[in-house]
Structures are given as C-alpha cells and as structure tokens.
Amino acid sequence: MLALMTIGDRIKEARKLRDMTRPQLAEAAGIKYPTLAGIENNDQAGTTQLPQIAEALGVSIRWLQSGKGPKTAVEPDPTDDDYTDVVGYSQAVGLGAAGAEAVDYAETHSLKFKNTSLRRRGILNRPLAVYYGKGDSMEPTIEDGDAILFDTSDTRVADGVLYVIQVNGQANPEYYVKRAMVLDAGVYFASDNPAGDHNWKKPKAMDSKKHPITVIGRVHWIGGWAD
C-alpha cells in the first residue's frame, strides 16, 4: 500500500523540480530555515507560511496543501488587478470552551479583497490568511462561523487588539482568537464574552509556564451574517 504524500513531501518534490536547496527556498519565501525544515519534516501542523512557500515554488496553494487540483499556479487574470486573493483555510479558531486543533490538510479556497481597502488598512501585500470562528466567547464581536482575516507578519502585541493565538493542546496546537491586554504585570489575553467559556473566564498570561501563548497574527477584518 502506497503511503499518502504529505505537505512536506510535496514541498520537497516541487523544490527539487526547481533545483532549489532548502536554504534557497527559505530565503525566497521569506521564512526562517528551521520553520521550513519543520514543515518539510511534517513537524508543524496548520502552518500559515504555505502561501509564501507556494509562491516561491510557483505551485498552486491548493495542490501544495491538499494534493488536489492543478499543480501549477494559475496566472492571475489581468482584469483582477484591483483585487487581492487571500487564502482561506477550513481551519477553525476557537472562540468558546475548547480551542480548535490545528488541521494538517485543511481544504483551501480564496477570498477577494479590494486593494484599496487593504491599502487603507496598511496590509496590502502582507501575508494574510482567513480562518473561521467556532464558539461564542467572543460575542458580539465575533459570531460562530464568522470569517476572520489576519496578518501573520504582525505579532507585536498592542493593548485592546484582537489576535489569532496558539496554545499547546493535548495532541496538536489549538488556535483561538482573543483580545490582548497589556498591563503592568505583563501581557494577557481575554474573551469579550467570558460567560461563554468556562476555560477563559479570566484573562490568561502570555508567558504562562504551563500554557504559554504564541501570537500567530493580528486580526484586521471579521465577516459574518447581518441580523
């Protein structure tokens, strides 16, 4: 029985076809070498660096992540110059009692955003991604199922800002969206609706020894249904 190819296997295959070494790909994609090595060796789940890697390799992000669809990246339609395609993952981020575990092979799609809107926000040409909310502890700011656009290059914590964060779970890392609180005692993350989540009734310290928090990216846009 043939073993299924992993994301790491597809990266290695595409890299060798382009006669690129791992250090060369890391430089072209603008990511750290240990990060790329971890992805190729399947040590990192739910990574947000795949769009940069796919662009550097000239392959389709959907093929790179799932092995489905055409391998070669489709050339952009010149009529779409006013829009940017942002990769959307089926990956959920926890808003409620439990975090959403990282999904290795989440299906991908793309959402179009006006360049003028991204430019006004100061995030045009940034490494952006979209995850989807799950739970109710960030209501009314974020509802269950809302799309969440975030910038993976902005991990500097500012008071009162929403971030996609990662906390180590029982098996895989767990993702949440929480609001930052910068206090004299340190950096904390909290729910907008603490009553909706017994695990986040109180803010949690970023530098907790038992459950340290890693910032994945700053949230810039939330999309959901109108009442």
Image: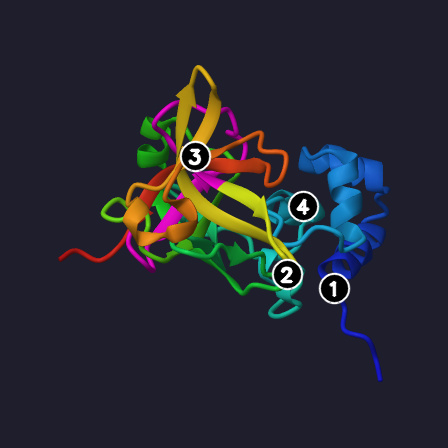
Residue 152 drawn in magenta: yes
Question: Mark 4 belongs to which amino acid?
Answer: Ile
Residue beneath disc 1? 6
Residue beneath disc 2? 104
The residue drawn where x is 80% and y is 50% is 15
Element on which disc 2 rests: loop
Frontmost of labels 4 and 1 is: 1
Residue beneath disc 3? 189
Frontmost of labels 3 and 2 is: 3
Element on which disc 3 rests: strand
Q: Earlier in the sequence, mark 4 or mark 1?
A: 1
Frontmost of labels 3 and 4 is: 3
Residue 111 % position (x, y): 40, 53
Q: Residue furthest bottom?
A: 1
The magenta stretch is 142-164
Task: Characterize the local packing of mark 1: few (<14), some (14-19) or many (20 or more) Cα atoms within 10 angstroms.
Answer: some
Real-space CA distance between mark 1 and mark 3, rounded to the nearest whole angstrom = 34 Å
Q: Is residue 72 visible?
A: no
Image quadrant holding the N terminus, namely bottom right
Residue beneath disc 4? 53
